[in-house]
Amino acid sequence: MPLFQEQALARAVYHAGQTLLSPEDVDLSQHDISSRFFIPTVLEYQKYRPLQAVLVRESVFSGEWRLPNDCMKVAWIRAVNWTRSLGSPTPYNRLLAHQWWVQDRTLFCPSGQWEISYLKKFTLSHKVPEYVVSELDGIMGEHEFYLPCEPVKSTVRLFYGIGEASDQTGTLVGTGISSGSIDYASGKVILTFTEPTTAPVTSSFSSRYKYVEEIGLEDEIFMDLFATRFLVGFANIKTQHNLEGLPVNINLDDLLSYARERESQFKQRLETDKKWWVF
């Protein structure tokens, strides 16, 4: 976590060590990949596996409580157990279904303090507050690092213990370095340190395209779903519009066959994974 569309794309085009495509073969723009595939897949995935949030002491006045912007569905409500901090093992009972309801994004229930559990949306954002680009410290001289996605110009900041550097439209300027540069398209960063760093190299920046905070590359179910949606869509675009760009040794039937395999894996995981939320 987090997951950027560039990472998802690179993972989606590989199959068991055999390259069906490489990211360079995909001649769609990153904007198209974001709007057609990445964000729609995230929104589809959150229907299957939404996040759960619990507000432990929420005050409800006049019997009404405005739902948070990220709320998809209220799961349950129960009275605050004031003795829980004293080691009480038994929580208070949840309110019955007829005692609360939701209308026009407002929760109606008896006034008081409640524990409220709800299903929340995934967070899609441009702002990356912290990302570790190198876990090493004590490095000196010229080093290369890679950001996980294409950043917005002049938003990149790097922190490495002895100082920090900021992006001045392609040139990195800061303390503890003699020179620095960044290639926006590849995310490649080059820094020349004048003295050993005293902390891992971290960065903050704004990504050009939205990323999702709560999903990572290790989430195999999402990766199966994204691979299915992207590969089928990409193959259909190639077929319908006769676009150039696929290597001559790549067959669209193979691509669709692999997509069907990933879709089968997704459905199987969906049925067998015991961690899915059920209400």
Image: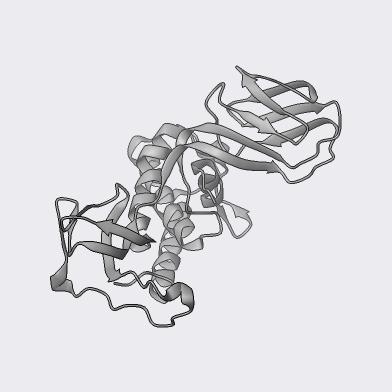
| Viewer can see residue 165 | yes
- Give the image location of residue 65, x and y in percent: 22, 54
Left or right of 204 in this view: 255: left
Total labels drawn: 0
- Give the image location of residue 145, x and y in percent: 71, 35
Identify the image quadrant of residue 190: top right
Q: Quadrant of the C terminus?
A: bottom left
| Viewer can see residue 274 | no
- Give the image location of residue 224, x and y in percent: 46, 59
Applied colour scheme: one colour
Residue at 44 percent across and 81 percent down: it is 88
In the foreground, 250 or 161: 161
In the foreground, 81 or 17: 81
- Give the image location of residue 194, x and y in percent: 85, 26
In the foreground, 157 or 117: 117
- In the displayed structure, 93 sits above or below 126; it is below
In the foreground, 68 or 251: 68
